[in-house]
Amino acid sequence: MKFDFEYYNPTKIYFGKTAIDNLADELENYGKNILLVYGKGAIKSIGLYDKVTEILKQSGKSVVELAGIKSNPTYRQVLRGADLVRKNNIDLILAVGGGSVIDCSKAISVSAYCEGDPWEKYWENFEPLSNKTVPVASILTMTGTASEMNAGSVITNEEKMIKGGRVFTPNVNPKFSILNPEYTYSVPKYQMVSGVFDIMSHLMEQYFSGDDDNTTDYVIEGVMECLINSVRKALVNPQDYEARSNIMWCATLGLNSVTGLSKEQDWEVHNIEHQVGAYTDCAHGVGLAIVSIPYYKHIYKNGLDKFVRFAKKVWSVDVESMTKEEAALKVIEKLSDFIKELGIPKSLREVGATEEMLTKIANSTVPGGTYKHVDNDEILEILKECY
Amino acid sequence: MKFDFEYYNPTKIYFGKTAIDNLADELENYGKNILLVYGKGAIKSIGLYDKVTEILKQSGKSVVELAGIKSNPTYRQVLRGADLVRKNNIDLILAVGGGSVIDCSKAISVSAYCEGDPWEKYWENFEPLSNKTVPVASILTMTGTASEMNAGSVITNEEKMIKGGRVFTPNVNPKFSILNPEYTYSVPKYQMVSGVFDIMSHLMEQYFSGDDDNTTDYVIEGVMECLINSVRKALVNPQDYEARSNIMWCATLGLNSVTGLSKEQDWEVHNIEHQVGAYTDCAHGVGLAIVSIPYYKHIYKNGLDKFVRFAKKVWSVDVESMTKEEAALKVIEKLSDFIKELGIPKSLREVGATEEMLTKIANSTVPGGTYKHVDNDEILEILKECY
C-alpha cells in the first residue's frame, strides 16, 4: 500500500434472494415523491416492475416514471430526468436496472439543481460538485459496472459525440442497493458476457499499474479467479445461483474502490472504448474486450513483472519454465482465448465500426496509460490492429 | 454467495504517511468536548501524543483524558470512561492506540447513556442497542483487531472472569480512522506477531465454514497470502513500509465485514481464547495461535475439502500428490510451522496457565463451531493438547 488513500463508501447493500424485502423499510427514510428510472422493459418481463410499483404504492409514494434509458445513456435523457426532478420535487431517484440506468440516475441527481450546463461543468471541466443533489437508490438487474456501489456516472453526449465518465464524491453513491442474483438469470448471454468482461477490465485497469506488491493486488487476483471460474459455470447453467451471485458480487467489489486502493491505475482501455462506444454504440464490455488485446500487446514490455505475476497467479501459467517475455505473451493469449470462450466478437468491424471512424475515434480519445503513455497515433495503431 | 447478507460500513479511512493531516478537518464535524483515550504511553514515545494534542488545541477543543487502557480492556475502565463522558458532556471519543483502546472507546460510547448495567444488557444478554451513543474516532497504532473499521467491542469483566465480545450496529463504528503504518514501526516484535496471528485467525474463522465456493473465499485467500508474505518481510525489516502497510490493511479487511460476507463463520477458536485470555491475560493473538492447532486437528475431518483448498491455495501444498486427509494434516503442520516462524509460544503453560485453570477455562467457554460443534468436554481436550 505504497500510496496514501482515502476510503469511504456509505452505500448500504442488501444482497440475496430476499433482498427486496428491505425496500419498504428503506423507503421510510425518504419523502413522498419518487422518480422511478428504468430501461426498455426487461424489468417488466421478470415481474420486477410490478413488485416494485406495488411496494411503492403500499408505502404511500407518489411515482413519476422515466423509462427507456438506453444502454449508453444519453445526456438528453439526463436533462429530461433533471426536468422531472425539479417539476415534481423528487425526494428519491429509484433506479431499477443495470449500470446504465444507475449512471443516468446519478447524472440526473447532480444535474437537476445545477446552475449552468451540467455536461460542461461536470463531465467536461470536472468541476467539483457544488449544488444540491437528490438521493439515488438502486435495484440491480444486470451486473458489470458496480454503479450500485460507487459514485461513477458515464454519459454519452450525442451532439458532441463524446462518451464521458465522471466519478463524484461518495454522497452521490446510491444510498442503498438491492442485489438479487436471480434478477440476472434472464439477462441474454451476450449482455452477461459483456458485463463479465467489463468486470474483468475494471480489475485489470486497477491491477496493471505500479511495481508494488500490495494487499489490493492480492485481492484483485482472488476476485479475478472467482470471476473466471464462475462465468464458466454460468455459461453451462445460467441459473446456477452461486455462480451468478459470485459474478454479481465480483462486479461490485471490482469497482467499489476496494480493488483500487493505493493503486495508480491505468484506465486507458476504458478511455479508448468510450470513444468506440460513442461511434458504434456497441456493448461496453464487448468494446473493452476488443480493445484489450492489442492494447496489452502495446504496453506489456513496460510492466513485464506484473504480466508475469498475472500469468502465474490468475491463469496458472507455468512461468518458471519460460522467459518473462514468453510468460507475458502467453497470458495475453490466455486472455484472448477467454474472450473467445465467452463468445465475444474480436473485431471493431463486427460491432459496426467503419474504417473511416478509426481516425475519429483515435483523435477523440483521451490519451494516457500508466506503464506506458499511449498517444493518439498509437491509439490509432491499436484500433487498426483490432479492426 | 449462498447466503443473503447486508453490508454497510460507514467508517471513513485515511490511510498513509500523511493521514493525520486530515484530523483537523474531521474534528470540525464534532463539538468542543473530546475524550482522549489511550493506553500505557506508547503513543507518547513515538511523538503521536504531542502531535494529536497540538491539533486538538489548535482546533479549539476541550480535552479530557482517559489513559492506561489495558491490552485486555476491563469493564471497570469502561465505567470510568462512561462517567467522564456524562460529566464532561463529551462530543467525540478519540481513541489513539490499538484494538483494545478502540474497543474500550466503543464500549464507553454505548455505556455512557445506558439505563441499567451495560455489561448485563449488551455483553451478557445481547440486547439491541437502544440508548444514545457518542461518536468514536480512532488513530491506529497497532494492527490486528480491525476495530478501526467495525462495530466490535471485546471487554473483560474482571469480577465475573469473562472476556465478552459484542458486535454492535454500524453506527457504533468509528466515524473515521487514521491509519499510518509508520506508527506501527515501534510496536515490539511480540506484539506485532500477536497482531498478525489475530488477523490470520479472523480470516480462518470466516474461511472455515460452508462447502461453498464464493467470492469471499477467494478474497480471504488473497488477503492471507499477502499477510504471510508481508510478515516475513517485516520480520527481516520492521521498517519495510510496504510490508507494514500491507499488514495494516490486511488487518482492516480481515474483520471489516468484507471477508465475512455470505459466510456462516466459525469463531470457536476465539470463543476458547477469550476464556484463556480472561484467566491468563495473555496477548490475544498468542492465545489464538496456541489454541488453533489442536482445534483444527479436532475439526478438519468435517471440513476436509476446505482444508485441502486452504493447503493448495494459501500454502502451495502439492495436494494432487496426496490424499485429502494427508493434505489437511499437512496444512495444519504448515500453520504450526508458521506460528513457530513468528516466534509465538506454543503452549498455554508458557503464557501462565496452570493445570487447574484448564477445567475452568473449558467450562466457561461458549461451545460452538461450524464444521463440527465442540462441547465443553471437547474444549477441555483441546486445551489439554496445547497445555
Image (cartoon, coloured by chain):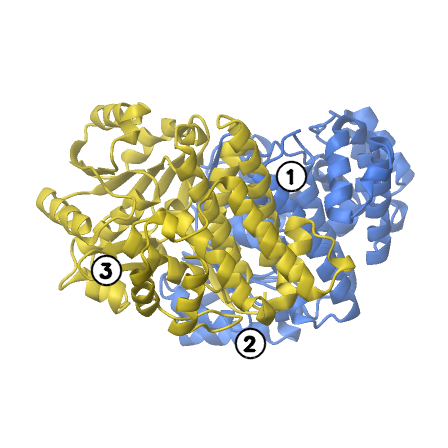
Chain colours: A blue, B yellow
Locate residue B328: give its quadrant: bottom right
* Chain containing the residue with disc 3: B
Q: Residues within 10 Å of mark 1 (few under 14, many from 20)?
A: many
Residue reaching furthest front? B355
Residue B46 against residue A249 in the figure, above or below: above
Q: Is residue A126 visible?
A: no
Residue A257 against residue B243 in the figure, above or below: below
* Chain containing the residue with disc 1: A
Circle 1: residue type: Gln
Residue B222 against residue A309 in the figure, above or below: below
Q: Is residue B240 left or right of residue A248?
A: left
Of B189 and B35, nearer the camera is B189
Query: Quadrant of the image for the C terminus of chain A?
Result: top right
Circle 3: residue type: Met
Name the secondary structure under disc 3: loop
Circle 2: residue type: Asp
Q: Residues within 10 Å of mark 3 (few under 14, many from 20)?
A: some
Q: Which residue is mark 2?
A: A50
Name the secondary structure under disc 2: helix
| 3D distance between C-alphas at marks 2 and 1 | 39 Å
Asked if the residues shown at circle 2 and circle 1 are in contact, with their CB atoms under 8 angstroms apart, the answer is no
**Disc number lying in front (1 or 3):** 3
Q: Earlier in the sequence, mark 2 or mark 1?
A: 2
| 3D distance between C-alphas at marks 2 and 3 | 56 Å
The percent coordinates of residue A68 (x first, y second) are 64, 61
| 3D distance between C-alphas at marks 1 and 3 | 49 Å
Q: Which residue is mark 1?
A: A206
Of A254 and B159, nearer the camera is B159
Q: Is residue B273 visible?
A: yes
Asked if the residues shown at circle 2 and circle 3 are in contact, with their CB atoms under 8 angstroms apart, the answer is no
Q: Residue at x 50, y 39 (%)?
A: B247
* Chain containing the residue with disc 2: A
